[in-house]
């Protein structure tokens, strides 16, 4: 890859699962090296639905130093240049009454679902969202894949979200399905577009976004289709690298 000057007005934002890594897997050395090469050309940020600990498990403990931005929980926990910049609270936004009503409905619904396996941590409370997993987040990798294949056929998560949309219609909640075993719940406007309100202050002329769940209902859809970004749909980390090479390392640049 030929040397080129850093374009400080161009930002590339990347989803994590399915874009930079396989689902819940550690980043490969090839991707780590590529991101550092890309960072010599443009500004680089990561925006994931997971909390910071899970992003660090996948991208490395020092990820907040190795990219320009890390937006955990859709940007509700935001890091820039290695420093924590802002944190939002779903508790304060929703209020305890609605929060408990929602959690109780989920627990009752979960009790009606029959699956080949159920494990633990069905509801994970994060700073800016709730993560709901019918199988439970403590499942093994093999159990994760088993559930994902079943979910593609039986639409378990999609049906769960439909029930929640009906039950909590007009209550200011949004839902997005991402990854393989869960979906996120958050106040309206707290999807991945939230991070765009933060980076807008840095006056980028162009923002590219790369993600795999870009169809309606997927957790990349809103930011992918937002007019402030140029959205790119990818299916795996290898495709992400290939596409970025075409866009930012072509011989004509």
Image: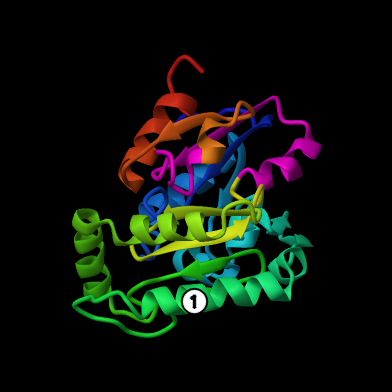
Residue 203 percent location from the top left of the image: 78, 31
Splitting the image into 4 quarters, where does residue 24 fall? Answer: bottom left
Residue 103 percent location from the top left of the image: 55, 75
Q: Residue at x 36, y 72 (%)?
A: 134
Q: Residue at x 67, y 70 (%)?
A: 98
User: Could you classify mark 1 by the number of other residues whose Cα lies within 10 Å: few (under 14), some (14-19), or many (20 or more)?
Assistant: many
Residue in front for this viewpoint, 146 or 211: 146
**Is residue 46 a member of the stretch shown in magenta?**
no
Q: Residue at x 20, y 69 (%)?
A: 146
Residue 154 percent location from the top left of the image: 22, 58
- Asked if residue 58 is positioned above or below residue 33 in the image, the reply reads below
Q: Residue at x 23, y 80 (%)?
A: 117
Single out the residue that lies furthest toward the top: 252
Residue at numbered disc 1:
123
- Asked if residue 216 is positioned above or below residue 138 in the image, the reply reads above
Residue in front for this viewpoint, 141 or 219: 219
Task: Find the magenta span and give its range.
Answer: 193-221
Mark 1 lies on a secondary structure that is: strand
Residue in front for this viewpoint, 207 or 167: 167
């Amino acid at each position: 890859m030929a040397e080129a000057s850093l374009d400080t007005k161009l930002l590339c934002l990347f989803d994590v699962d399915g874009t930079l890594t396989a689902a819940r897997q550690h980043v490969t050395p090839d991707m780590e090296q590529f991101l550092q090469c890309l960072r010599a050309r443009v500004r680089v940020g990561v925006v994931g639905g997971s909390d910071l600990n899970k992003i660090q498990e996948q991208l490395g403990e020092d990820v907040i130093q190795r990219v320009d931005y890390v937006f955990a929980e859709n940007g509700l926990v935001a890091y820039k240049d290695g420093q924590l910049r802002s944190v939002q609270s779903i508790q304060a936004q929703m209020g305890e009454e609605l929060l408990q009503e929602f959690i109780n409905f989920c627990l009752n619904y979960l009790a009606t679902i029959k699956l080949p396996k159920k494990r633990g941590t069905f509801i994970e409370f994060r700073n800016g969202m709730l993560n709901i997993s019918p199988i439970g987040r403590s499942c093994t990798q093999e159990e994760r894949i088993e559930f994902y294949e079943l979910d593609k056929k039986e639409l378990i998560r999609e049906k769960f979200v439909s029930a929640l949309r009906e039950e909590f219609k007009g209550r200011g909640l949004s839902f997005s399905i991402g990854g393989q075993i869960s979906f996120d719940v958050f106040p309206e406007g707290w999807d991945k577009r939230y991070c765009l309100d933060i980076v807008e202050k840095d006056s980028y002329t162009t923002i590219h976004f790369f993600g795999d769940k870009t169809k309606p209902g997927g957790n990349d859809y809103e930011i992918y289709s937002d007019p402030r970004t140029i959205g790119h749909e990818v299916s795996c980390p290898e495709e992400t690298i290939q596409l970025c090479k075409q866009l930012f390392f072509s011989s004509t640049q």
